[in-house]
Structure formats: structure tokens, C-alpha cells
Image (tube, grey):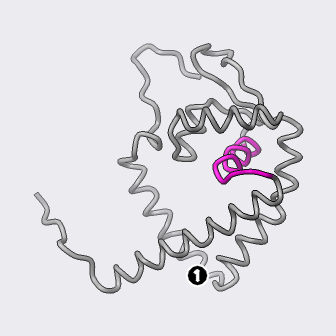
Amino acid sequence: MTDLPTALTPRQLDAYFAFTEVSSLVRHAVEKQLREAGDLGYVQFQLLARLGDAPGGALRMTDLADGVVYSRSGLTYQAQLLEQRGLVTRAPSPEDERSVVVTLTDAGRATLATVFPGHIEAVHRLLFAALDDADVEALADVLGRAAARLRADPPRSAAARRRRPGAASA
């Protein structure tokens, strides 16, 4: 058994506090921009953006939940709100009717086109303006490794759904 640390080093504590502060401040400002520009919550934006990047603008609900690290029930609610606004549609998967496929509509694409310029500006101004290219490379590397480690033992909302033996893949 490995010995677990009993404390963080001062530098680890500085890094942890800086990470949580930056994360909170950027998310708050981005959420404000998304609400003002497109009446979208952060998770709703993530859903639309992932659909916008997906082939055919469609993904299974479980894949969306796994990608945005959000509970499946919470994601269902957010997708329902987006569907009521006409930004997405939901339908049974043609491959497996137990799965639900969410598809971005033209109105959803238009909403993304409306919010993206301000979103990009906010992220650049709040996070990347203070960094040079080498800093961005280092940040991407460090956070990528941390994300990979966290995804190796994810919370249920971030874990890929286990398939039953013999179950059809959607």
C-alpha cells in the first residue's frame, strides 16, 4: 500500500487555490455572458457546443452526459428545456430504441453562432490574455494529464455507461 500524503506542500496549496479561483471566476463570467447573449446556462451551452461539433449534429444522451460530466437525469432536464426552445430535438435512436438521440436544430446552430463570439472573447480576455504561447501549451498539458487521471476513475456522471454483454451499440 502506498503512503498517502497527510498535507499539501505550500506550492501545491498555492496551485490548488489558484486553480479553483481561476475556475470559479472564469465560469461565473462565462455563465453571465451566455445568459446575456443567448439565455443559456453553462451546461446548456456545453450541450449545444458538443452537438455542434458532432457528426450530423447528433449524439446519444448518455454520450452527452459522459462528455459534460453531468448526471443523466440533470442532462435530461436540460435537454428538455433546450427542446422546448426549439434548439434541439430528441428521438429514439434508430439503432437502439432504448437510447435517446439529441440533435441540434437550425435554431440551435443560430444560437451558437450568436453566443460564440462573446464566449471566445470572454475566455480569451479572462484566461488566455495573461498567458504566452508557452504558458498555454504548459497549461493544456498539465490540465490534460489531470483530466486523464480523473477520467480513469470518474464519478458516475463522467463514466462511460457499461454495456451489457450482447447489447447493441448505439
Left or right, 152 with reference to 131? left
Residue 45 in the image: x percent, y percent? Answer: 71, 50
Residue at the image position 76 percent from the left and 57 percent from the top: 35
Figure quadrant of the N terminus: bottom left
- Residue 100 in view in this figure: yes
Q: Residue at x 67, y 17 (%)?
A: 92
Dominant SS of magenta comes to helix
Q: Quadrant of the C terminus?
A: top right
Can residue 56 be seen in this snapshot?
no
Q: Reply yes or no: does residue 43 show up in magenta.
A: yes
Q: Is 137 placed left or right of 152 in the picture?
A: right
For residue 99, what is the image quadrant? top right
Q: Residues within 10 Å of mark 1 (few under 14, many from 20)?
A: few
Count of all numbered marks drawn on residues in the image: 1
Secondary-structure class at tag 1: helix
User: Of residues 75 and 36, which is closer to you in this image?
Assistant: 36
Whole-percent x and y of residue 123?
Answer: 70, 70
The amino acid at mark 1 is Asp
* Above or below: residue 130 compared with residue 84: below
Question: x, y percentage for residue 131?
Answer: 63, 84
Identify the residue shown where x is 89% and y is 46%. 110
Q: Residue 105: horizontal and vertical position, in percent?
A: 84, 35
Q: Which residues are magenta?
A: 39-53
Horizontal side of residue 159 vs 46, given as left or right = left
Q: Residue at x 77, y 36 (%)?
A: 57
Q: Residue under circle 1? A: 135
Q: Is residue 52 magenta?
A: yes
162 sits left or right of 7 in the view: right
Q: Is residue 164 above or below residue 85?
A: above
